[in-house]
Image (cartoon, grey):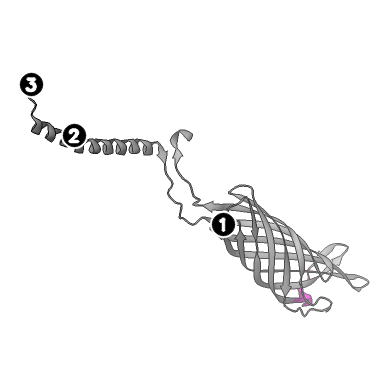
């Protein structure tokens, strides 16, 4: 005759009831560990994306109604692909063809440098819109143009300081995380110039052109799990 000990059976079932969840949790934990071992996780979702670059550009504009060629150099820090702050320098040459006498014709040249700031819209897209502004100071001078043989003669005392505020608008195209192209336009506001001959009163005027920036634009970019077999 087989006699069942109901008390012992009940106790054993209760033990198994608690043991099963423990085993299940242990298995899940082991499986998760195995899965994590096959991945590299970049947990920097909340990090600010940094960037730094130097840039060169060329712009065509006008001063006092005459063609003016501008060269631009910039170096800047980019915060979270939303804002730039740095240094910019501009040099320009304007073909004024101002006849002084039979043997002397003057053109106009100068340069200025200062603080560069640039708010950026749609920074996470391939194409961005930005609004640069340069606030700085520099100097301007008349130069002798004798059959395109340029001679800058500072002994003439024909130079003057100038203060500049230059806002603009750019369209930016991100070729890669290292290279960015820009095309844009800007308007230069300047202080009054007191420079003989007194034909040019200021260097106000529009200019438009293009440039290239080289650097790293998204250091610390957001990344997620990457399977080791993808390496």
Residue at mark 2: 16
| 2 and 1 marks in contact (CB < 8 Å) | no
Mark 2 neighbour class, 10 Å CA radius: few under 14, some 14 to 19, many 20 or more: few
**Nearer the observer, 77 or 193:** 77
The answer to the question of whether label 3 and label 2 lie on touching residues, with beta carbons closer than 8 A, is no
Q: Quadrant of residue 228?
A: top left
**Which residue of the protein is positioned furthest toward the top in this rendering?**
1
Q: Is residue 231 visible?
A: no
Query: What is the tally of numbered marks visible in this picture?
Result: 3
Q: Residue furthest right?
A: 102
Q: Secondary structure at mark 3?
A: loop
Residue 46 among those drawn in magenta: no
**Residue pictured at 62% horizontal, 66% vertical:** 116
Res 65 → quadrant: bottom right
2 or 1: mark nearer the eye: 2
Front-lying residue, 132 or 135: 132
| First in residue order: circle 2 vs circle 1 | 2
**CA–CA distance in space, label 1 to label 3:** 80 Å
Q: Residue at x 56, y 52 (%)?
A: 216
The image position of residue 87, as x and y in percent, is 61, 65
Q: Is residue 25 above or below residue 61?
A: above
Q: Position of residue 106 (x, y in %)?
A: 85, 70
Query: Is residue 225 among what the camera can see?
Result: yes
Foreground disc of the pair 3, 2: 3
Residue under circle 3? Answer: 2
Q: Give coordinates of residue 230: x percent, y percent.
A: 48, 35
The single residue placed furthest to the bottom in the displayed view is 194
The CA span between labels 2 and 1 is: 57 Å
Q: Secondary structure at mark 2?
A: helix
Tag 1 residue = 81
What distance separates the C-alpha of mark 3 from that of mark 2?
23 Å
Q: Position of residue 7 (x, y in %)?
A: 8, 33
């Amino acid at each position: 005759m087989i006699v069942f000990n109901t008390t012992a059976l009940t106790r054993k079932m209760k033990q198994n009831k608690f043991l099963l969840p423990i085993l299940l949790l242990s298995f899940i934990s082991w499986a998760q560990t195995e899965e994590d071992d096959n991945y590299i996780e970049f947990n920097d979702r909340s990090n600010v994306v940094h960037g730094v670059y130097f840039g060169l550009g060329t712009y065509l504009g006008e001063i006092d109604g005459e063609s003016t060629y501008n060269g631009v150099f910039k170096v800047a820090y980019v915060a979270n692909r939303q804002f730039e702050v740095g240094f910019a320098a501009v040099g320009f040459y304007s073909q004024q063809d101002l006849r002084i006498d039979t043997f002397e014709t003057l053109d106009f040249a100068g340069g200025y440098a200062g603080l560069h700031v640039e708010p950026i819209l749609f920074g996470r897209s391939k194409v961005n819109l930005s609004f640069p502004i340069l606030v700085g100071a520099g100097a301007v001078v008349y130069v002798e143009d004798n059959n395109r043989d340029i001679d800058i003669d500072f002994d003439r005392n024909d130079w003057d300081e100038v203060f500049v505020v230059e806002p603009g608008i750019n369209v930016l195209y991100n070729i890669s995380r290292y290279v960015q192209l820009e095309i844009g336009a800007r308007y230069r506001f300047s202080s009054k110039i007191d420079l003989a001959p007194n034909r040019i009163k200021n260097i106000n005027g529009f200019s438009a052109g293009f440039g290239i920036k080289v650097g790293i634009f998204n250091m610390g970019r957001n990344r997620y799990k990457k399977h080791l077999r993808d390496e």
